[in-house]
Amino acid sequence: MNITFLLNGESVTLRDVDPTQSTLNWLRDARGLTGTKEGCNEGDCGACTVMLRDADGARAVNACILFLGQLDGKSVTTVEALADAGTLHPVQEALVEEHGSQCGFCTPGIAVSLATAHLNGDQAHDDVLAGNLCRCTGYAPIIRAAERAASNPVPKGIAAVPDLPKTDDNAMRPTTADTLAHSLMEHPHATLVAGATDVGLWSTKALRDIRPAIFMNGVADLKQIEVTDSHIHIGAGVSIEALRLLMLDHHPHFAEMLRRFASVQVRNVATIGGNIANGSPIGDGPPPLIALDAVLHLRRGDVRRQVALEDFFIDYGKQDRQPGEFVEVISVPRGPDHLRVYKLSKRFDQDISAVLGAFNIAVENGNIASARITFGGMAGTPKRAHHVEKALIGQSWDLDTVEKAAQAFSKDYTPMTDMRASADYRLRTCQNMLIRCFHEDSGAKTSVLEVTP
């Protein structure tokens, strides 16, 4: 595969290169750009952060789980290119002045994350840095540096919009959904690579050969969002960050959960279609979407079909998807916002959920008119709590009803015990989340209503 992209402003063309090689390894081994560090090699620590620019703008991403095949037609900026004509970038200068570095290993990734946020005018520094782990500083001097740099202008070299190389529409790197569909018919068992935040670990941790791989990140059709009077249509290639921004106006509780879904670097490239299609029982996207009665639009060649998202998950590791078929669009009905979403994890930021609960409960005249409750982490697939829903619908919306209905969770789920939580803890969590949903809907503050074992 031939790949053309910009690296620190220089046009680079790689011919007959392995497209599944990580960008991190190529930067360090082939180009000697060792400022980009290898820490976790799984997208957690942020030491390998680089700036990726394309038609969607500038984003901080993890180079360790970014394949070379994803770079075609894009621009990559490493820490070595942040300085402009020998003058430090404002965030680099501020990190020096505020003593924001001790051992220094994480500093290059932090500098790139802050420089990308600085370019984008993003001053939510705590969120920006959630994906950059630093064991030394305690973050206070880093935050001071970010605040200090925020008012300074963006250097000309960084501010300039790069003239991106053109990309070709081909079977293994399609730019349209039609080409993708036809390519999958020819290679029905190829590995589909969108954001690679999951597939990347197959390569870096499981040491799997994922070839042949079809790189979907250039398919513009799949990145479209359409809001009509009746539905929100979300392309499967829409990033988790783009979905978060969309949901701020429609289901803000969902949007807040997506902020905790992962770090900025991961949210910038991870896609909602990938989060659904990998079929994980602890994926954070499906439970809220199932609670919203979402429908998947699947495509195989020129044949399309629809399936309710809750019916897509058949069993652990098994989905209703044929060889050569892919998720094209997710449709969500529009209506009043009743959705509440609760994520329980050991770490607050960028951690896998032990349990994730989504509650879409409509109350009319004091009575529960409808209820769709879905959990991840409680079964081999994302699963609705039908017994609890039945116990709620038609009853008065009060604490007595909620506490009685919560006992039915034991009929809906037989959770497992693993490293994240015990079965008893998970069951109690479900009950407490429902009670918390009631109290929040009633206007009570719930900071003391933490889920307890």
Image (spheres, rainbow, N blue to C red):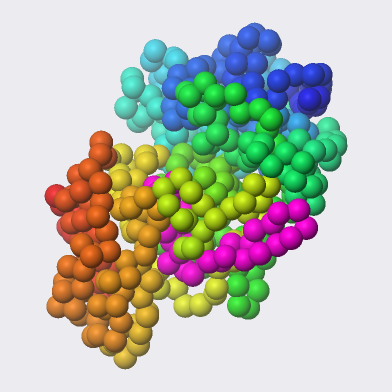
Q: Viewed as shown, does residue 282 lie left or right of 235?
A: left
The residue under the point 68% across, 47% down is 324
Q: Viewed as shown, does residue 151 lie left or right of 346?
A: right
Q: Position of residue 174 (x, y in %)?
A: 78, 41
Q: Viewed as shown, does residue 239 lie left or right of 9?
A: left
Please state which of residues 162 and 262 is positioned toward the viewer in this rendering: 262
The residue under the point 35% across, 67% down is 373
Per the rendered image, the range of residues in magenta is: 280-308
The quarter holding residue 50 reads: top right
Q: Is residue 166 above or below residue 32?
A: below
Please state which of residues 130 and 365 is positioned toward the viewer in this rendering: 365
The residue under the point 37% across, 39% down is 351
Residue 281 on the magenta span: yes
Q: Is residue 193 above or below residue 47?
A: below
Q: Viewed as shown, does residue 171 lie left or right of 262?
A: right
The residue under the point 47% across, 27% down is 42
Residue 168 on the magenta span: no
Is residue 19 visible to the viewer in this orientation of the structure? yes
Is residue 173 visible to the viewer in this orientation of the structure? no
Q: Position of residue 280 (x, y in %)?
A: 44, 46
Q: Position of residue 175 (x, y in %)?
A: 78, 44
